[in-house]
Image (cartoon, rainbow, N blue to C red):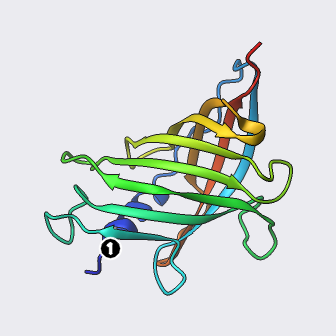
Amino acid sequence: MTSSSPLLLLALMLAWSAPAFLLARAGDQGLKRIHLYMHETFAGPNATAIVVVPSPLGANATFGLVGVLDDELRDGPDPKSSSLVGRYQGIFAGAGLVSPPGMQSAINFVFTAGEHSGSTLAMLGPVLSFTGAIERAVVGGTGAFRMARGYCVMMAAGNPTPDSIVYEVDLFVKMDYA
């Protein structure tokens, strides 16, 4: 197996686990919802997510691996008919020895077009399970999102291919601190 095999396995496990729930509680007040699609390619010459340090435990292990990603953020699921609005950039590391293996991540949403152009959101947190939505904390931002807080819910949108996957991303961000 190649060094990107653990990443492919992780992405496929996430994609096959469409949860019955998504979105925020209706009672959340003061949260702005931003709905996007993250397009990730994990194979081939145009890969946007790669493992840069394989696990010291072997090719099929995820504990100790380190990877980077620079995925497209779009306003729709189809890359041909949707607009590029930014990048989903960050690092991830295999940090769990138990099954399912835990992944820790530090992610930045870098908005390059549209309503939020020039702003960023910072996200931090684990992938706790491969059988449901991925939820992470929004811990800050810049520009229009300076001092933002909130959360992000992601899940696979559609069927992955052997080379890529699309995630539906819902950000819920609080920016008023009066």
Query: Which residue has dot 1 on it?
Result: 5
Nearest the eye: 31 or 142: 142
User: Can you give x and y, in whole percent of width and height, for residue 170 in the image?
Assistant: 66, 43
Residue at x 51% of width, y 39% of height: 135
Nearest the eye: 109 or 10: 109
User: Can you give x and y, in whole percent of width and height, for residue 105 in the image?
Assistant: 43, 48
Helix, strand or loop at disc 1? Answer: helix
Query: Which amino acid, by three-letter code, is at mark 1?
Result: Ser
Q: Quadrant of residue 149?
A: top right
Q: Is residue 46 above or below residue 59?
A: below
Nearest the eye: 153 or 145: 145
Residue at x 49% of width, y 59% of height: 15
Report the number of numbered marks. 1
Left or right for 138, reference 57: right
User: Can you give x and y, in whole percent of width and height, for residue 129 in the image?
Assistant: 37, 44
Residue at x 76% of width, y 61% of height: 76
Q: Is residue 45 above or below residue 14?
A: below
